[in-house]
Structure formats: C-alpha cells, structure tokens
Amino acid sequence: MKNIFIDSNVWLRLFLADQKDHFHQAVGLIESCQSGLLRPYTSSIVFLEVHYVLRSFYKLNQIKTRTYLEQMRSTRDITVIETTDIDLSLSYYRKYSVKFSDCLIASQLRKDIILATFDREMGEIKEITTNTPGDVLSSLKKLN
C-alpha cells in the first residue's frame, strides 16, 4: 500500500469541482483511499490552507467550509501530521523558490510518503517525491 500525502489543492479541486480533469483525479484518489488501496496523510497546515481558500477566496460560509473540513478528517484511516521541522522548512525556503507554506508541508513528509499535488512548484523540492493524483492512480493500475 502506498503512503500518500494529500495536498490542499487536491482537496480544493475535489470540493469545488471547478476543473473537470483535476476533479476526476481527486475523486479517484480519495476513492482509492476509501477502499484501502492508498494510506492517506495530510496535515493541519493543509486544513488551514483549505479553510482559508474556501472562506476568503471562494467566500463559502462557515457551515459549508466546516462540512468540507469534516469530510477531510473522515477519510478512511487518514493520518494528520502535526510535526513540522522549522529548520528544514527554512532550508527548503532558502534553497528553492516555493511558497513557505509548501516548505512547511515538505518538512512533514517522511521518505516513504508521496505528495499528491497539482502544484508543479512542489516538484522543485528534490528531497521529496511528488506526483499528480492521476499519476498515483496510474501507478496503482500498473500494480494490479
């Protein structure tokens, strides 16, 4: 079973269904987690980012936003990573031209966890493994 860290943009594409291809990839990824084919991870940073984008950019009300956050939390066997390595985050921030919040998330990933993201910039951080949800799903099909 692959360990997959689900990034903020995957959750947002799932909830908002505003980009058809990304929506279908996100649905497939979450369905693979729900069926036990993937072991999902995310973090409190991701919860905060999702909350912020839904409330400030998309102007969703608190009830709808809370429903989405609760759906994230109720994903089968999801592990919410709380530990962040600030020194490693700052090192990534110094070394790569990515957002600091992405550096914080990268610092949370163990070597055996693949970051599922649509954010191409995250691929700049060479110390982590990133794949789109579609690539993760393709690799699952090859295993079966």
Image (spheres, rainbow, N blue to C red):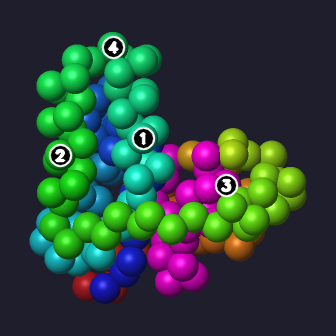
- In the image, residue 142 sits, relative to residue 102, either above or below, namely below
- Say what amino acid the circle numbered 2 marks: Glu
Distance, label 3 to label 2, CA atoms, is 25 Å
Marked residue nearer the N-terminal end (4 or 3): 4
User: What residue does disc 3 label?
Assistant: 103
Residue 141 at x, y = what percent?
30, 75
> What's the residue at 36%, 33% (across, down)?
51
Q: Where the C terminus falls, by quadrant?
A: bottom left
Marked residue nearer the N-terminal end (3 or 2): 2
Q: Tag 2's secondary structure?
A: helix
Magenta residues, start to end = 101-118
User: Dot 1, how many residues are within 10 Å of its Cα: few (below 14), some (14-19), or many (20+)?
Assistant: few
Residue 122 at x, y = what percent?
64, 54
Marked residue nearer the N-terminal end (1 or 2): 1
Distance, label 4 to label 2, CA atoms, is 18 Å
- Say what amino acid the circle numbered 1 marks: Leu
- Say what amino acid the circle numbered 3 marks: Cys
User: Dot 2, how many residues are within 10 Å of its Cα: few (below 14), some (14-19), or many (20+)?
Assistant: few
Q: Which mark is residue 70?
A: 2
Residue 61 at x, y = what percent?
22, 17
* Residue 87 visible (yes or no): yes
* Residue 120 visible (yes or no): no
Residue 81 at x, y = what percent?
42, 66
Marked residue nearer the N-terminal end (4 or 2): 4
User: What residue does disc 4 label?
Assistant: 59
- In the image, residue 34 sits, relative to residue 37, either above or below, namely above
Distance, label 4 to label 3, CA atoms, is 26 Å
> What's the residue at 69%, 46% (across, down)?
100
Are discs 1 and 4 less than 8 Å apart at CB? no
User: What residue does disc 1 label?
Assistant: 48
Q: Where the N terminus falls, by quadrant?
A: bottom left
Q: Quadrant of residue 58?
A: top left
